[in-house]
Image (spheres, rainbow, N blue to C red):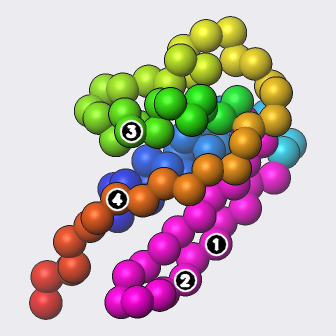
Amino acid sequence: MLALTNILGNAVKHAPDGSTIAIRGWEQDDKIHVAVRDQGPGFAPEEADRLFEKYYRSVRSATARSRAAASASTLSRPCRAPRR
């Protein structure tokens, strides 16, 4: 749940005011997938492996916030099943 909160928080934080944030969720092969698309600065493809590192900040978000269209990217990370 915290990961989803962080992803949505980042979308709100970095998307231009008045822009759209699209959220999509689905189940496939016993896995939950969530896609979030916004109009923020995005990240460079070479940064994808580092995005889940603690305290990592994208070079684009750390600089003077270019509003160029971000390329669509797919990120995945294994997560534990909820305790029952």
Residue at the (62%, 58%) spot, across then down: 36
List x then y, in percent, for residue 22: 72, 62
Say which label, 3 or 1, has the lower sequence index.
1
Q: Which residue is mark 3?
A: 49
**Main secondary structure along the magenta-highlighted residues:** strand
Q: Which residue is mark 2?
A: 26
Front tag of 3 and 2? 3
Helix, strand, or loop for circle 4?
loop
Q: Which residues are magenta?
A: 20-40
Say which label, 4 or 2, has the lower sequence index.
2
Question: In the rendering, which numbered label is found on residue 77?
Answer: 4
Name the outermost residue toward the left: 84
Residue 24 is one of the magenta-drawn residues: yes
List x then y, in percent, for residue 27: 48, 87
Q: Amino acid at mark 4?
A: Arg
The answer for how far apart the CA atoms under marks 3 and 2 are is 23 Å
Say which label, 1 or 4, has the lower sequence index.
1
Helix, strand, or loop for circle 1?
strand
